[in-house]
Image: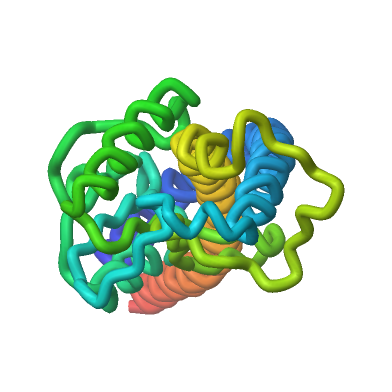
Amino acid sequence: MGADIKSLRNRIKSVDSTLHLTKAMGLVASSKIRRATDAMNKGRQYSDAVTKTVDALTLCPECIKSPYMRMSSGERVCLIVIAGDRGLAGGYNANVFRLVAAMPKGDIIPIGKRAYDRFGGTLLLAEGFTYGDAISISNMLCKAFCEGKYDRVGIVCTKYVSMLTQEAMVKWVLPLEKKEGAENRGVIFEPDELTILNAAIPEYVAGVLVHSVRESFASEVAARRCAMDSAGKNAQQMIDDLQLDYNRARQGAITQEITEIVAGSGM
């Protein structure tokens, strides 16, 4: 009985230590949520503005000559994979890697420590990702696409739906496609539409990439907050159950000692 009490006491201490850890990580995630969502919203505004301009340009007849609108039946794919810098975020990283596994095989550019650990390459942290990083990647990819090295370029990221829901998705950024419903009425491009389109694409790809990284990071923080809340509740429930077992074992040991004392005094 004494061994059981000691074992239960050790387990309670161990789970309580885990509970303190999950609470601390949850508080850190909570402190980052507002800043991450603000950055995500700003990135979305810039990305939407650049995307509308590019969509309008793709409707111009001259722009069909752009190398960025080259269509090919080939499967030479390059994927920018955005994952987290840390674990303990529920299914956040696993959902991204599961989606990558279902995609055509090709070159991968990782962003985030977990993506780097899985695919190798150059380490770029998602939390510290800058526009300078984005434009460097964009220039390299645009050049490779124009030279025919890739037929498609996509970004595997996570869409922030709400604090409780985040969805892994892929955004195909190259080649460009005509967007039905886009408008270019009353817009005059100087010197001409084709020149503007070719010059704007590196900025467009960089803008979409920055927004995708910021949205993915906001999703990671939200997923970690929810995961830590759930882990904390489970740990507290486990502590309550272990404490009940501990009290029962302790009460049983006391009862046994009293019984032995009474039996001994009657002899």
Q: Nearer the viewer, residue 266 or 255?
A: 255
Q: Is residue 229 left or right of residue 100?
A: right
Q: Is residue 168 left or right of residue 117?
A: right
Write the residue at 39% across / 68% down: 95
Quarter-of-image position of residue 267? bottom left
Q: Is residue 166 left or right of residue 205?
A: right
Write the residue at 64% across / 61% down: 59
Farthest right residue in view: 186
Say if 74 sits above or below 28 in the image: below
Q: How many marks?
A: 0
Quarter-of-image position of residue 161? bottom right
Write the residue at 48% across / 67% down: 169
Residue 41 location in percent, x, y?
72, 41
Residue 189 location in percent, x, y?
69, 36
Q: Nearer the viewer, residue 24 or 242?
A: 24
Whether residue 262 is visible: no
Q: Nearer the viewer, residue 110 or 153?
A: 153
